[in-house]
Every structure is written in structure tokens, then in C-alpha cells.
Image (cartoon, rainbow, N blue to C red):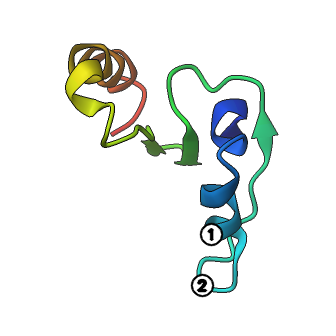
Amino acid sequence: MASLSLIQKRALVRELQGNACRVILVERCSLGGCDIILDPDRATIVTSLFALPVQIEALAEKISKESWRYS
């Protein structure tokens, strides 16, 4: 499953769905704070490296909040 915000990142979606990865994304409006749920135990949060220094505290809070859901 993929969040709406991830689906809007067209270049990333094209790569995931391309021949190298062949990922089938199922779009959901919201996945809590995650961008991709891989399976019941794993999820991914996508962020821009350029924006990381500015968003570090918000990202750390998001990871902390979501970490109890996944192992």
C-alpha cells in the first residue's frame, strides 16, 4: 500500500513500477505517518535529503510515533 503523498512523487513511482522493481502499488489516502507499507511488520517513510536538516525533529517524531506499529 502506498500513501497519496507518495503516489504524487511520479519519478519514484515510475522507478518502483519499472522493470527493475516491478512493485504494484495500492493507493490509500492515508497510512498514518508511513508512505509505503511493505508487510504487517515493515513500513517506509520517504523524505527529501535536501529538506532533512530542516525536518529532522519532525521526522524523528514521526518515526517514534510509527515505530510501535512495526517491528
**Mark 1 — residue?**
15
Secondary structure of the residue carrying tag 2 is loop
Name the residue nearer the viewer: 67 or 10.
10
Residue for point 36% across, 18% down:
62
Which mark sits nearer the N-terminus, 1 or 2? 1
Q: In which quarter of the image is residue 31?
A: top right
Q: What residue type is labelled 1?
A: Glu
Count residues near mark 1 (Cα–Cα under 10 Å), then give few for <14, some for 14-19, many for 20+.
few
Please state which amino acid type lies under the numbered disc 2.
Ala
User: Which quadrant does the N terminus fall into?
Assistant: top right
Left or right of 37? Residue 56 is left
Residue 33 image position (x, y, % from top left): 50, 22
User: Dot 2, how many residues are within 10 Å of its Cα: few (below 14), some (14-19), or many (20+)?
Assistant: few
Q: Nearer the viewer, mark 1 or mark 2?
A: 1
| Residue 65 placement, left or right of 4 | left
Residue contact at pointers 1 and 2, CB within 8 angstroms = yes
Residue 10 in view in this figure: yes
Q: Which residue is drawn at 57% across and 19% down?
A: 32
Q: Nearer the viewer, residue 48 or 58?
A: 48
Q: In this view, does 21 lie to the left or right of 8?
A: left
**Secondary structure under the numbered disc 1 in the rendered image:** helix
Quadrant of residue 27 within the rendered picture: top right
